[in-house]
Amino acid sequence: MKTPWTLQDGWLILQKRINNCIIYTLFVQHGISDKYVVDMAIQVILKIGIFALEYGEWHAKPDNQRIWSTLKVFMKEKWKLKTITSNAAGQFGFGISTTTDGDNNKKIDETYANSMANFSAGHANTTSTISWLKSTNAQQATTTTQQQQQLMMMQQ
């Protein structure tokens, strides 16, 4: 398990590597304990330095729950959350460093202005939709009341 693993590799890649190690140890008739598998996985996970809180959460689990099958489910959820919430500088148009020149600042300002305009347009559409729905609901309430009165008259 000396092959480095990163968040971008995906949890399933690491899980597959560890499962392959388990199979290999069984093949050579030198199986390893579940505790050792979990320890090995935790060491690899902690090397990337972004799962410290999750490790604390994992370590707080009772001993009988700190097994490989439970870790697979636990880390799959944690990995997914990290990938959704991690924002690398590259995702925002930056290269290796986040320093910029004047042209790039102008592009960023334009992008920001466009996103604000899009947000404003979306907000205006949402507001008009809500107003239309309120109006429709009021009309339906009136219509429902009239229909109920008509039904009562028919039943008499």
Image (tube, rainbow, N blue to C red):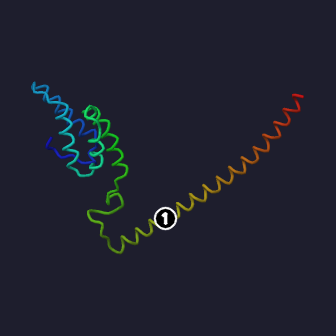
As drawn, 92 above or below 22: below
Question: Is 115 or 15 nearer to us in this picture?
Answer: 15
Question: Is 14 or 59 nearer to us in this picture?
Answer: 59
Q: What residue sits 53% from the left and 64% below the top?
A: 117
x and y, in percent, of residue 97 in the image:
27, 65
Question: For residue 17, which quarter of the picture?
Answer: top left
User: Residue at label 1?
Assistant: 114
Secondary structure under badge 1?
helix
As drawn, 32 above or below 74: above
Q: What residue sits 23% from the left and 35% below the top?
A: 16
Q: What residue sits 89% from the left and 32% below the top?
A: 153
x and y, in percent, of residue 26 in the image:
14, 26
Look at the image and tell me in which quarter the N terminus lies: top left
Identify the amino acid type marked 1: Asn
x and y, in percent, of residue 130 in the image:
65, 53
How busy is the neighbourhood of tag 1: few (under 14 within 10 Å), some, or many (20 plus)? few
As drawn, 137 above or below 89: above
